Amino acid sequence: MKNIRLRYAPSPTGFLHIGNTRTALMNYLFAKHYDGSFIVRIEDTDLERNVEGAIESQFENMNWLGIIPDESFLKPKSEFGKYKQSEKFERYEKIANDLIKEKLAYKCFCTTEELEANRELQISKGIPAPKYNKKCLNLSDSEIKNLEKQNLKPNIRFLVPENRDYKTIDLVRNEVVFNSKEIGDFVILKSNKIATYNFAVVIDDIDMKITHVVRGEEHISNTPRQLMIYEALKETPPTFCHLTLIVDETHKKLSKRSGNEMFFISQYKSQGYLPEALFNYIGLLGWSPSGEEEIFSKEEFIKIFDEKRFSKSPSTFDVNKLKWINSQYMKKMPDLDYTIFIKDFVDQSKFDFKKYSEHDFNQILLLFKKEIGFGVEINEHLQLFFNPNSIIDEKSKLTLKEFSTINVLKKHVTSELEKIEDWTEDNIKMVIKNTGLALNLKGKDLFMPIRILTTCFEHGPELAKTILLLGREQVIKNINL
Ligand code: GLU
């Protein structure tokens, strides 16, 4: 495929979340795989619903993830028109008026009350999906003039062709056919002269020479209206691709409203997820590669992308899988990068890491490199190194009681650790080994009581290293409390 152009068209009514990121990312991969262009267009016609800062935040988060547009209002190309719908009102109005001249659209002066009354009437007759009753379709020119003289502002409605099939070959659903019977004459330009979504989106996709429209399946019901507008404007529609839903474990559409608390990209960022890992995980939502492999860099994704591999059924957002993918990326980080990254997530109000030298604190952080799923999880592990009063929890105390050798162990380990001249990991290992030999203890019977005695915790990272980093003073204090 040559010169393909795809777009992500957010409305600035909200921030970048898992759902719209998936749309942006699939458009991006599709475009980049074929060396095409990825465009971001802002659909901000609904001025009242626009949220302050939403656009900036969407760009910032996309940038963080590595979903970089080739064109946007920040990088416009003048031959494709404006990249914000709010800057195109005049263009939409002109085209709506052209359609009136061609008798493909008409002015409608019905009031909200009239429309509502008509709706209710149809519902009372058992019509499940009421349609506009075309009352204004045949207004004469003089009637229209009269109404306009009274300063009444009309909506412009599209004249839906009667009983026609509209067909598209969707990349996910194959052939989809809609009959126009179900669709009433819909408004394309509101009385305040603001274009509606279905109208503006088609004009923009034409102006921007969009070849493929990849978007969520909630837009499938808009597609026939858009196909009709393409026809009226004598333009070829793009290829559509309606991605299946992303659902949560309860099979509900993933959304803030369904109670999914972790929904926005910025939340994952502040919890210490890596952009590469999010990119990787979201790239597998509703799309799958041919093999078993699941870890892909952006470049690999671009290479293996195949528009025939979109999934036909909903995909479940599985935060544990995301966590696993994130941990894979953290494990692969060079040690220095990892410590710099992870330090930002340490809760300094609980753990004042100045207590350790920079070197030692980095070593402490590295002890958990293979264990944590995301940044802030580090705080679940650090208590062990910030326990100056040697507090031991009840469960560990009970476990300790299971070992009859405690008193001898305490004495032996204390004196052996005190004897060490050079406080090194090897020497500490030697103490543990010799203690086992001297007291005839092995495996769990040796390590578990020594671990609880020296660290106050039943679980933890490599024992000798932990003892080394805790420091002799703290370890002896732990043992003897
Ligand atoms: N502004 C629409 C949305 O945010 C885009 C729809 C489309 O891609 O056509 O859902």
Image (cartoon, grey):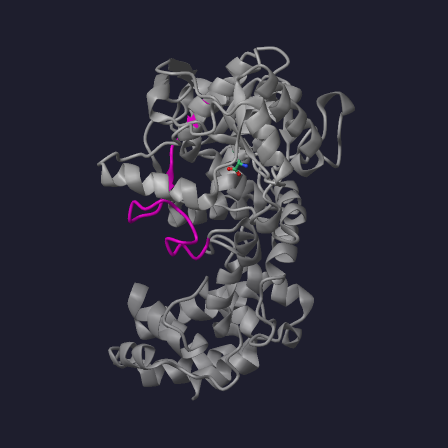
Q: Give the range drawn in magenta.
A: 241-262
Query: Is 429 on the left-hand or right-hand side of 154?
Result: left
Residue furthest left in the image: 126
Looking at the image, which residue is at 66% across and 41% down? 63
Residue 153 part of the magenta segment: no
Quarter of the figure that contains the N terminus: top right
Residue furthest bottom in the image: 481
Image quadrant in which you'd find residue 223: top left
In this view, 117 is above or below 33: below
How far from the left and from the top, in percent, is residue 449? Answer: 34, 74
Q: Can residue 412 be seen in this view?
A: yes
Query: Is 441 on the left-hand or right-hand side of 217?
Result: left
How far from the left and from the top, in percent, is residue 97? Answer: 63, 23
Q: Is residue 280 visible?
A: no
Magenta segment, prevailing SS (helix, strand or loop): loop
Looking at the image, which residue is at 44% across and 27% down? 185
**How many numbered circles are shown?**
0
Image quadrant in which you'd find residue 46: top right
In this view, 260 is above or below 348: above
Q: Nearer the viewer, residue 416 or 290?
A: 290
Q: Which of 145 and 231 is in front in this view?
A: 145
How far from the left and from the top, in percent, is residue 319? Answer: 40, 49
Query: Is 335 on the left-hand or right-hand side of 317?
Result: right
Residue 243 part of the magenta segment: yes
In this view, 318 is above or below 421: above
Q: Nearer the viewer, residue 231 or 268?
A: 231
Looking at the image, which residue is at 61% across and 17% down? 101
How far from the left and from the top, in percent, is residue 114? Answer: 42, 42
Q: Nearer the viewer, residue 463 or 336?
A: 336
In this view, 283 is above or below 430: above
